Amino acid sequence: MAKTDAEKKRIQSQLAQLPAVDELLHEAQKREFMLRFPRPLVAEQIRGRLDQIKQKVLRENLKVKDLFSHEDFWRVLDEALTELLTPALKKVINASGVVIHTNLGRSPLPSAAIEQIAAVAGGYSNLEYDLELGARSIRYVNVEALLCRLCGTEAAMVVNNNAGAVLLVLSALASGREVVVSRGELVEIGGAFRIPEIVTQGGARLREVGATNRTHLRDYEAAINEETSLLLKVHTSNYRVTGFTGQPEMRDLVALGEKHGLPVIEDLGSGNLLDLKSFGLFGEPTVPETMATGVALATFSGDKLLGGPQAGIIVGRRELVEKLKKHPLNRALRIDKMTLAGLEAVLKYYLDPVSVTEKIPTLRMLTVDRDELKKQARRLQRVIRRSCPAAADLQLKVAAAVSRAGGGAMPMVELASYALYLRVQGRSSDRLEEYLRTRSRPIVTRIVDDWLVFDPRTIFADEYAEIGRACQEFLSL
């Protein structure tokens, strides 16, 4: 319905009561907004807030005096600008006990890797420059030698993640031809990464063999024809089929491939350079063990069991790696200087297998002694008690718990642990979990039987005090 002249006049009279943008910008200057926020953003937010008020006056027949308060205006503006400029990616305290937590960035890096990344990120580097020859070089050169030494291979290269590594291998070696894969290995992992779709995206045709639970060597042999390009093995890193199962030995599959002139490629998923069996951790073959079977190429992640930055690592026969390096897709998947710097620092720790479990956070968390975890849980208990001395409704107990490797690694392995269990009488554990998760320094926990669980396996030593402060904050609400 059209507004009458009287209504229009009344609305204009109401809108005229709003301060002008220039007037508010002058006030913002006096309130020192320009010292904390860029002037164009302040002006944009002022105009946006005024427009919201105008729309309410027009739509809801409200009065300006009911909508505009100077103090509320500046408070809302301050909050909006602060939120806009606060980094979306935050440092999080992982108290969940999931070591390689995909949603929390997988493996935390060791200090040497962080220092090396910072060193090259802040200036120029010899990323693709040979300082001795004064000529262009290849960006993998430093890590390639390390990977070959640690994995026992002829050549190596690195792309941005393991999915990219598998895609590059298929695109370079199997496009237009068939790839033979066991039905029991047609996995889907996080982010809807599916082996059948990766094969298709790589331009190859999938040839499924065997059954979900059992695949025989004869199944592979029966599938081989003149269109076959390679035999692909996929490590089922995020699940296990148990019971009446079977897969051919890798050496037998390699022998079959050699008989027909076909390379055997293995997607190892997590990728493990250290034998963890002595720590009671089974289920993940090491990369050197895999390469010793004679596979032509293996791919694996850099940010899972390896404990480094996100990367897709490819190791194996030189002539095949050279084909991958020359493929056009390689440029789209290549890693940057920061990833290379971090990966090199992490790989160098593996040159000393005695100390590597202490130097790399992921390995330290996976292999920490259960008695030490009990001691750390009790330490956290003391920290929280000191932070909340008058909280009579606060209940704390140290008890056995189960941690997880996470990241699709060792899915059947339960890591025996001790944790601190917390609850507050009369308060919801769900509400406390949400509060900790949404504060400015987030703390991610888990709930078991209405107790909030803090697993010290994944908590760093300098984070205990922050957890104490967070509990104190919640109890004071």
Image (cartoon, helix red, strand yellow):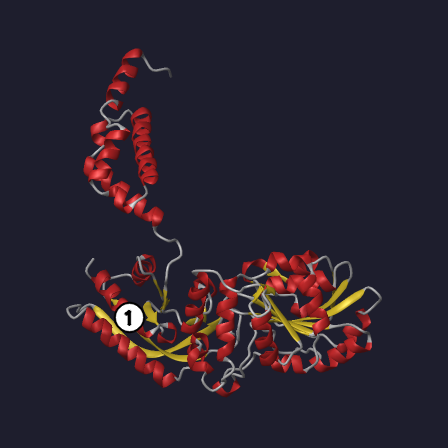
* Residue 407, horizontal then vertical, whole percent: 50, 69
In the image, residue 91 sits, relative to residue 85, either above or below, namely below
Relative to 287, residue 87 above or below: above
Say which quadrant the N terminus sits in. Answer: top left
Left-right relation of 400 to 263? left
Residue position for label 1: 422
Name the image quarter holding residue 358: bottom left
Q: Is residue 33 above or below residue 1?
A: below
Where residue 249 sits: x, y (%)? 70, 81
Q: Residue furthest top?
A: 5
From the viewer's side, name the closer residue of 264 and 119. 119
| Residue 91 shows in this picture | yes
The residue nearer to you, when weighing 50 against 449, is 50
Quarter of the picture containing the C terminus is bottom left
Say if 243 sits above or below 335 in the image.
Answer: below
Q: Position of residue 421 (x, y in %)?
A: 31, 73
Q: Is residue 108 visible from the viewing direction of this image?
A: no
Q: Quadrant of residue 30?
A: top left
Q: Residue furthest right?
A: 226
- The residue under the point 37% across, 15% down is 2
Three-letter residue code for mark 1: Leu
Residue at 28% from the left image edge and 45% from the top image edge: 79
Answer with the quarter of the image where residue 113 lies.
bottom left
- Disc 1 crowd rating (10 Å Cα; few below 14, some 14-19, many 20+) is many
